[in-house]
Amino acid sequence: MRWIVPLILMIIILAPVSAVDMLDFSAKIAKGYPDEGRIERLSIIVMALSQALNKTPSLSREDVWVKVERLISWQNEDGGWGYFYGSVSSVPDTAYALIGLKYAYEAFKNDPKRGEEIRVAIVRGVKYLEEAFTGNGWGYLPGMTPDYRSTLLASAALVLLGEDLYLVRKAYQIIKDKLPSDPYLLHLWIMVTYNMEGKIPEESIKYFGNQEGAIALKAYTLLSLKGLDFQTAILLAELEEYKHNWTDKYYPLYSTMAFSLVSENVVEPSEDKLKKVCTILEASQNEDGGWGVYVGSPSSASVTYFVLDSLRICNPMSEAVKRGLEYMRRVYERDMEEIKFDKYLRQSYLFALLSLLEYRNLTYSEKEEAKSLILSSFWGDRFGKQPLTTALAIKALTMLGIPKTDKIIEENLEWLMRMKKDGGWGFTFETDLLSWYFAPVYPETTIILDMIKGIVLPSEIQDVIEYVKDNPPKQAWELLSIYLTLNKLGINQSIEVEIQEPGKSPLYDSFLVKYYTVNPEVPRVNIYTVISKFRNSSVKIISTDPALSTIVAKGMESILSTNTSVRLTELVRVPEYGDYVLIYPVGRIDVSRYNSDVKIYIRAGHLTLNGVPLSGDGVLVIVPGRNRDGELLFVLYRGEGYKEIARLIFQSPILKYLHGKAVIASWVDANKDGKVQVEELSVKFL
């Protein structure tokens, strides 16, 4: 987290350019900049491009690696680098090379081969500097009398690399009281001094000068030490004015470095797992319109029931659903004739009936016929009355309009409760010679619990709940089913669900759809990603505050060239699709559902965001988020003065460079005049 000191805002002419625009423009120039065979130039090119990697589309890993590899290849046998390729090693040029490789290593450290190549070069270079130390500083060559420039560069290299600062402390007296005139060396001097003194040498900042290269290095230095604030935002906006008018071809290198620090990696949307499973489910449908336990296995009415139930979540109007219902109607009509003949109520018939009822695919006369058929049939097979058939019949009758208090429902529920054994159900096997009841077993217990969970009282199935918690099923689909059932009942559970790759079993995938509905994968996103998406695009604003929505809309239109439309409503909701700015009071929306990195808590009457108190007379919070296919920007407010806070942020240069997980802007009315003043405002970037 960075704590930002408020500074006086300046009114400047704003161009609708963002950090990524400037970074992209600068990086294109930087990667084509000639090094002229000089280590100093090549090292600064490597430093700039390494920091821009993955933050601009105009820069590939190979673009950067070509420069890094060139710099490494110029290293001499003694571990140092010379002024030109092949020239004798010197302290300043070795320091320049090490500074560039420091940033290269950060960019490539996750690449085992390239990262190791850079690390080895750094180790050899550091060894050269250590051996070149004369006792109180560094000279141009090993053994020479220490000089200011060599000592500053060597000290900066060791500081930035995070090496032991023992030698730097001994050499610090040589550079301590003298500021270099070169802006790049001034940046290095400030970094060394900050590490030696433990504080930012504020007075030195004003010595950068007013040329665009110096402005870029000043912004880069402040961003490195403080992070983004109003002062650096103004500097960055000023740099944009030079976009097509650089007075020195060197300056885009420094601009690349500065804008890299406010241009985060764009967080790409994660795979929509729910959509993926829905697509797989539809694709795994058999030719006859049904689904089997496994892809390609014969269609089953029970599996097709569970799949169709889940496709109501995906797309109830899809062609797959239409074909699935046609399959279920054929099963329904076929089994109905067989039931009329032998009076045994078939489970496949009941599964088909339930699907047709859930999709409202039966006429009134068909419903009456189904009700009559169930009531006039034996709820089992030739081996006896079956608990699963009974549970399915009870479920069907309640959906056909028979109340739970009806005698037939109550009597069969009582029978079903009596058939529990050790907290589960099974199946009966009766002949003229013997009678067996196999229980508890799966999947009977799983399906029966699912069918009656909304019909019986929780106390009546408490023993079943305990059984499934203590003895979870082995089949993956059943485990998901139990998990979902207990979740529906609001029961704290210890069942661990291990998610498998979909596409093998439609039965498993059907429950996976429901799992992702109950436990959607919470996305991760940063502010930079959202701001980048909103630039030069159309965004809808939903707000509970008309004045605040106007401030936000005008700022986005002016600074980001965003086309906005505003809808005012007291209804707090987050659309599933599209790009939105959502303006609500703090605490009215659970932002953690749309960004897993941000959580707002209310404890003992106090609000916190990721542990940071939302305190002050007025607070404005900016949080990025993501829905099913779009980007969200939550603008949350509380207290007084939040409109003026919003005006300072949304109608100033800082809007273009916002980044991080969230922004918290707090106002404390120090002079008690009820007016928001800049010096009373503090901003925190998380």
Image (cartoon, helix red, strand yellow):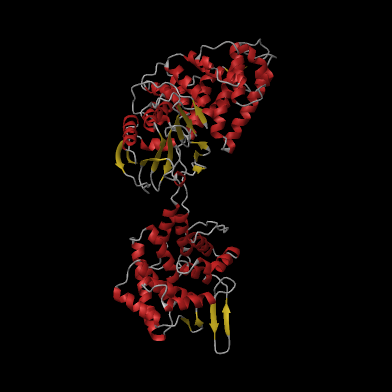
- Give the residue displayed 57% in from the left and 73% down from the top: 440
Residue with the most extreme bottom position: 432
> On the rendered structure, is 613 left or right of 585?
right
- Give the residue displayed 33% in from the left and 75% down from the top: 367
Q: Nearer the viewer, residue 176 or 460?
A: 460
Q: Position of residue 585 (x, y in %)?
A: 40, 40
Q: Is residue 286 above or below residue 628?
A: below
Q: Nearer the viewer, residue 388 or 169?
A: 388
Q: Quadrant of residue 431?
A: bottom right
Q: Position of residue 150 (x, y in %)?
A: 60, 14
Residue with the most extreme front position: 672
Q: Position of residue 338 (x, y in %)?
A: 39, 82
> On the rendered structure, is 125 left or right of 387?
right
- Is residue 37 in view from this perspective? no
- Give the residue displayed 62% in from the left and 21% down from the top: 80
- Is residue 98 in view from this perspective? yes
Q: Is residue 539 above or below residue 321?
A: above
Q: Nearer the viewer, residue 102 or 522?
A: 522
Q: Is residue 137 above or below residue 390?
A: above
